[in-house]
Amino acid sequence: MSCRPVSAFFYSALIGVVLFLALFLVSPAAHAYDKSELKITRTIANVRAKPDLKAPVVWVLSPAESFLIGKAQGNWLPVFPVSDVKDASPVGYVSNKVVVPAPADGPVVDWGDIRYVGKDLKYYLERTVKSSTGGMLKSGDKIKVGFLRDGWYAVFKADAKVVSEAEAIGYVQQSAVDLINDEARIRYAVRRINVIEKPVATSRAVGVLSPGHRAQVGDEKGGMYALFRIDTMVKKDTPVWGYAWGPFLAPYPENLEKAQMAGIDARKAEIKAEKDRKAQAEVKRDSELAAMEEAMDEMLLAPVKTKTMYATAVLNVRSEPDAKSLIVDKLEFGEAVSVGQEEGKWFPVFKPGEKNELKRVGYVFGTYLKAEAPVMKKEEPRKKRVPGGPDEVPIKITSTKMTFSENRNRITFSGNVKVVRLDVTLTSDTLTAHLRPDGDSLSDTQDKIKKIVAGGNVKVVMKKRKGHCDELTYVVGDSIIYMKGNAELQDGPNNIQGAEIKFYLKDNRAEVVGGSKPIEAIFYTPKNVSP
């Protein structure tokens, strides 16, 4: 009877101790770590299975990503994931020469790397084929792997961030997902990496490859691969997109690569076939051109048969049998010319060249060529006009500047323009005399003036009449003056104004057009006249 309380007490105490130890072992506080234990690497660094340079590499660390270290073993530091509970054994070991303290807000290492499954693959619940099967991975699936031990990877979902092996869905053998294929034309990023301009660590970034994104690879330089975009037709002279570190690029499974490259290879074959076809067409075309040139040489070297014809008008000789082609020469009325065989409605014109060989100089429209010389009419001598004669009235024009445009057949005066003709005086800012197109000099302009246009502050005085407007046009043939824009004409005390005033010089009468404004006329009558 006396022993029973002691036994009960003993068992109660034993249970209490076990519970205390269990709480102590699983308590997060028991495995809490100082933030000073978080480290990063200055460069890309290998994590080895043992603290030995000859030990196999089980992981590659990117710079600036935090991880947890344990007690140093010589020049090596054990590496652990940054999680609430340390693993019983480290992920691996890293040299203390490349390790520096981590910033407080730095990103932590994602212990998963992207892999593509090249064939249907089982994954197991433990690192041995004798364990239970956890499930199947299909060919082409994208997964994450990490925590390499004894030739086995822990497997995680592709979109999960891996911070602890406890989140693994199972395990696969390293050889099943780590491909050895140095000739792979496609590689993909196992984690986010920069594509840099040159194969130098300090080169600027020109792009980014996200985890799982693929690119075509070229030559390897200093641990970096030359990259081309996945959809680029890579040829000998194709520019390189950029470079990326080899440890972060994995070969694509061969069967998936063939499917990916099939379209590109087919397009390359099409391009090559098209190139060959063009080359053959070019050879054929060169041959045809050579035959044409030979035939042309025979035709050009053959004696030219010509006949003499005469121009029945002043004719233009053009560069081609086309009225829109360039004028290269001119034939005068009655001029004899040597022509060849008619081409449509045009005759080729020939003239003697060096060594009296006939040379084609252009084409003339055949309608104006005749086989017989036209009769030349004798023109009566024109009476020579004497400037300033009794039948002419001088016009005096003064201005600060005068410009003659031969192409546009006009003379322009500008700046304080003043025109005086008998009892008519006109002043304006500018004045333009438009000539008929049958003259090419400043001589004899009086007979060639079609109209005169004055603009800007136009004022005109004609005996007792005074007027002003914005623009004045004098049509010589019709003897009509058009006054436009705020036109006003005073005749003694009488005044008329409107949008436009037409003054007929021959009839000595005026006509007023009001436009959008009413016509206004003021006439003065004697006071003693009844209305």
Image (cartoon, rainbow, N blue to C red):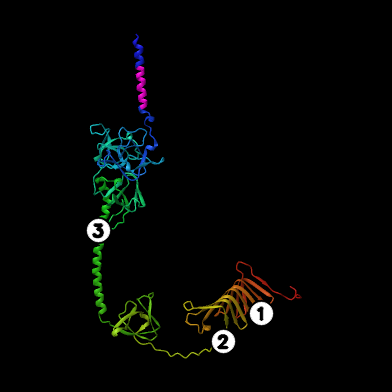
Q: Which residue is mark 1?
A: 464
Q: Which mark is residue 273?
A: 3
Marks 3 and 1, Cα distance to the nearest angstrom? Answer: 92 Å
Query: Is the residue 54 above or below the residue 342 in the image?
Result: above
Residue closest to the far front: 74
Whether residue 22 is in magenta: the answer is: yes
Q: Which residue is mark 2?
A: 392
First-in-chain label (2 vs 3): 3
Foreground label between 2 and 3: 3
Q: Main secondary structure of the magenta part?
A: helix
Kindly identify the amino acid type of the residue bearing the numbered disc 3.
Answer: Ala
| For marks 3 and 1 on the same chain, the one whose residue lies earlier in the sequence | 3
Q: Residue furthest right?
A: 528
Q: Nearer the viewer, residue 506 or 238?
A: 238
Q: In the rendered structure, which segment of residues is drawn in magenta?
A: 11-24
Q: Secondary structure at mark 2?
A: loop
